[in-house]
């Protein structure tokens, strides 16, 4: 193929990636996962895409790509792609305002909240964004593969903690996602855990048993067992067992919400029923909150067939109660801990409407704050690596948890 033709093909690919991130596509059947990956990597790394497309454009122009009409068409497509990437970058910049509003509105009931909330920084380190997959922070150490239960490597956890610790540290339990079938403790929430550890937190990231070998509630039992480990063994690693919050993304967001809403439920604590499994707060990212899709959010893209076959191993028609037990939206109650629910409008895997219904249900009964940040244009897993949007998310969560530490820790300890 000639340079003009090659340039046109490359420009079309670049525009396709940009378009995937701009549009919210659903019900694409076999194309859903490829679409997600294209939209995810483009939306969070918009400036990186501008850079590679610019380098490619210069190389093609120098190589004679503009000697035929195909090259000029390719150049036009590239300009359109760049315009779309600028829009995507603008959406990520706007997320700082979305998080600030969520904090203000969610804590408006507390007249003293302003004195505990620091202003979210508008600036994000370009150096960190330029190296999105570099996670290490000075002063943070990681203790790997600590056993917390009987299920082999699936009952192992990692501890991220400050090298210089003074006393016990507030503690975060991170639950990874992966559709209840894949994933590992060292793959997700690394920007958040490293940031909090550098701020003096202990962060615990746990594996858990996976389907199809595991059947619900095995997954939930394991993450509760990890929380029990924090209560009993965490102090040896610097953790404060009296102030533990839980977070997770996707399937991890589902399990984090369930853990927070089923505190001390003996059904999900076989052999460790006497250990306190309550948490001080829950921060679920792009979670799944209703296995039964009772509000019709997913429509024809229902997850029920997959869940029935792989995760639940039973039909919702024959065991409705068990499916309700697996649905955070059916477990909301007045004593729920504070929640900060975070979801993107363009999420192709966990639909934003489900998060809205969950927040509405939780706000309808909970006596504690329920914060909600809905991020325009954000795709599933947006916080997995460094980007402007994930940096704003980390800042907002750190602010929320700092507020809770200041206000709620004395009550929890009492």
Image: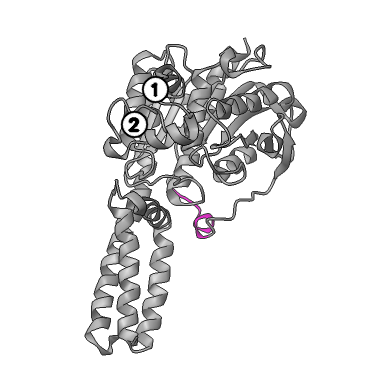
Dominant SS in magenta: helix
Image position of 384 with respect to 280: above or below: below
Q: Quadrant of residue 69?
A: bottom left
Image position of 309 with respect to 188: above or below: above
Residue 222 at x, y = what percent?
Answer: 62, 28
Q: Is residue 96 among the parts visible in the rendering?
A: yes
The residue pinned by badge 2 equals 354
Residue 406 at x, y = what percent?
Answer: 56, 22
Inter-mark Cα distance, 2 to 1: 9 Å
Secondary structure of residue under mark 2: helix
Q: Mark 1 and mark 2 in contact (Cβ < 8 Å)?
A: yes
Residue 106 at x, y = what percent?
Answer: 38, 25
Q: Is residue 377 magenta?
A: no
Callout count? 2
Q: Residue at x 29, y 33 (%)?
A: 297
Give, as a single range, the part of the protein colored magenta.
Answer: 123-130
Quadrant for the C terminus in the image? top right
Q: Relative to residue 391, is residue 279 drawn left or right?
A: right
Q: Quadrant of residue 112?
A: top left
Q: Residue at x 56, y 35 (%)?
A: 175
Q: Is residue 111 among the parts visible in the rendering?
A: no
């Amino acid at each position: 193929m000639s340079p003009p033709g090659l340039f046109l093909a490359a420009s079309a690919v670049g525009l396709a990636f940009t378009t995937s991130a701009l549009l919210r596509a659903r019900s694409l059947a076999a194309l859903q996962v490829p679409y997600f990956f294209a939209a995810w990597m483009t939306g969070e790394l918009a400036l990186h895409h501008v850079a590679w497309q610019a380098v490619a454009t210069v190389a093609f122009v120098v190589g004679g790509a503009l000697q035929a009409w195909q090259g000029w068409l390719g150049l036009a497509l590239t300009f359109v792609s760049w315009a779309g990437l600028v829009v995507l970058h603008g959406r990520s910049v706007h997320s700082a305002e979305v998080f600030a509003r969520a904090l203000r509105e969610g804590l408006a009931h507390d007249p003293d909240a302003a004195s505990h909330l620091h202003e979210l920084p508008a600036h994000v380190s370009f150096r960190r964004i330029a190296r999105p997959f570099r996670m290490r922070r000075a002063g943070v150490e990681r203790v790997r593969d600590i056993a917390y239960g009987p299920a082999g490597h699936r009952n192992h956890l990692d501890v991220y903690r400050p090298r210089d610790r003074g006393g016990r540290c507030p503690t975060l339990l991170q639950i990874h996602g992966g559709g209840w079938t894949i994933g590992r403790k060292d793959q997700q929430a690394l920007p958040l855990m490293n940031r909090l550890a550098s701020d003096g937190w202990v962060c615990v990231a746990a594996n858990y048993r996976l389907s199809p070998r595991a059947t619900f509630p095995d997954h939930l039992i394991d993450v509760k067992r990890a929380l029990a480990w924090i209560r009993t063994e965490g102090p040896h690693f610097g953790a404060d067992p009296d102030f533990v919050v839980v977070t997770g993304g996707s399937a991890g967001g589902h399990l984090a919400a369930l853990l927070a809403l089923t505190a001390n439920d003996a059904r999900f604590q076989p052999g460790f029923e006497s250990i306190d499994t309550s948490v001080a707060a829950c921060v679920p990212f792009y979670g799944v909150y209703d296995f039964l899709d009772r509000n019709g959010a997913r429509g024809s893209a229902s997850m029920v067939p997959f869940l029935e076959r792989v995760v639940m191993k039973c039909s919702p028609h024959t065991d409705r109660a068990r499916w309700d037990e697996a649905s955070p939206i059916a477990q909301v109650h007045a004593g729920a801990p504070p929640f900060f629910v975070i979801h993107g409008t363009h999420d192709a895997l966990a639909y934003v409407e489900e998060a809205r219904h969950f927040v509405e249900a939780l706000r309808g009964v909970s006596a504690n704050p329920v914060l909600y940040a809905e991020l325009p244009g954000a795709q599933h897993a947006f916080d997995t690596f460094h980007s402007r949007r994930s940096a704003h998310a980390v800042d907002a969560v750190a602010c929320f948890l700092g507020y809770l530490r200041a206000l709620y820790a004395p009550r929890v300890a009492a």
